[in-house]
Amino acid sequence: MNNEKLDVNTTIAILERIKDIIEANKDYLTQLDSAIGDADHGINMNRGFSKAIEKVRNNQYFDIGSIFKDVAMSLMSTVGGAAGPLYGTFFMRASMKLAGHKEADLTLLAQALREGLNGVIALGKAQPGDKTMVDALIPAIDALETAAKEGSSLKDGLAKALAMAEKGMKDTIPLVAKKGRASYLGERSAGHQDPGATSSYLILKAFYEALEN
Ligand SMILES: Nc1ncnc2c1ncn2[C@@H]1O[C@H](COP(=O)(O)OP(=O)(O)OP(=O)(O)O)[C@@H](O)[C@H]1O
Ligand SMILES: [Mg+2]
C-alpha cells in the first residue's frame, strides 16, 4: 500500500534540497559545461534555483501546482541560455498537471513529470541519445511510471528513478552531441558527460533525498 503523498511542505523541502544540491555542485556543472559548452551551466542553474526558492519562501501555498508554477517562472526569467526555457517548461508543464492538488501520490507525480518531459521534448526537439538532459529524464520517468504501476511507495519509486537517471547521465559520456552548443563540437563532444543530464540527475536526487528525511 502506498500511503505517502507529496504535499505542500514536502514540495517546499524538495525545492530547498534542489537549491542546496545545485549550489554544492555549481562548480562541477560549470566544469562539465566548460568541456563541451560555454562554462555557464552551474552558474545559470544556481542563479535560477536561488531565485526560485526565494520566491517560494516568500509565498503561501494551498496547492502543489502553484509551487511548481512559481519555480517555472523563476527559472524562465533568470536562467537564460538553453537550459532556462527547457527547465522552465519542465516545471510549467508539470505544474499544470498538479494545479489544484494539495498532494500527489506516485502516480500523479509520474504523470506530472511525464508532462514536463513532453514539454522539454516539444520545445528542444531532442531525441534520446542526442546527449542532452532528456537522456537522464526519459529513463528516470519511465522508471517512475513503472514503479507507480507496481504500487511502489513514493520513496521507492524515486529511488528507482534516481538510479535510472544516474545511468542515463553516465551513458551520455560516449555520445556525440546533436543538440545545443555541444553539438558544434561534433565528434569532439564524445568522452564528456552532458551538463544538462547531470543537473537533471541532481534535481531527481533532491526529490529522493527530501523524501528520505
Ligand atoms: N535542444 C535541447 N533539448 C534538450 N536539452 C538541451 C537542448 N539543448 C541543450 N540542452 C541541454 O542544456 C544543457 C546546457 O545548458 P546551459 O545552461 O549551459 O545552456 P547553454 O547551452 O549554454 O545555452 P546557450 O547555448 O543558449 O547559451 C546541455 O548540457 C543539454 O543537456
Ligand atoms: Mg552553457
Image (cartoon, grey):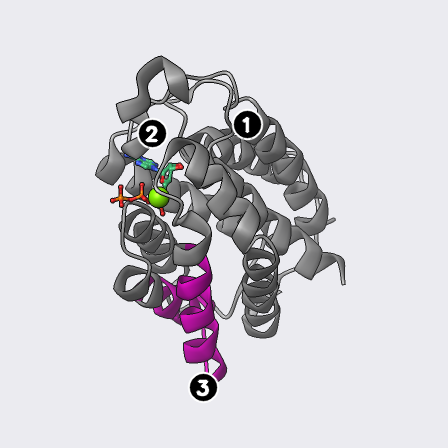
Which of the pair 91/63 is nearer the observer?
91
Circle nearer the N terminus (1, 2): 1
Badge 3 amino acid: Asn
Q: Is label 2's Cβ within 8 Å of ligand 1?
A: yes
Labels 1, 2: front one: 2
The amino acid type found where label 2 is placed reads Ala
| Residue 161 percent coordinates (x, y) | 61, 38
Q: CA distance from mark 1 to mark 2?
A: 17 Å
Front disc: 2 or 3:
2
Q: Amino acid at mark 1?
A: Gly
In the rendering, at what x and y percent does residue 58 appear?
A: 45, 86
| SS at circle 3 | loop
Q: Nearer the viewer, residue 125 or 151?
A: 125
Q: Is 6 or 196 nearer to us in this picture?
A: 196
Q: Is residue 126 magenta?
A: no
The residue to which callout 2 is attached is: 182
Q: Quadrant of residue 169?
A: top right
Residue range (magenta): 45-73
Residue to which mark 1 is pinned: 168
Q: Residue at x 43, y 57 (%)?
A: 43
Q: Which mark is residue 58?
A: 3
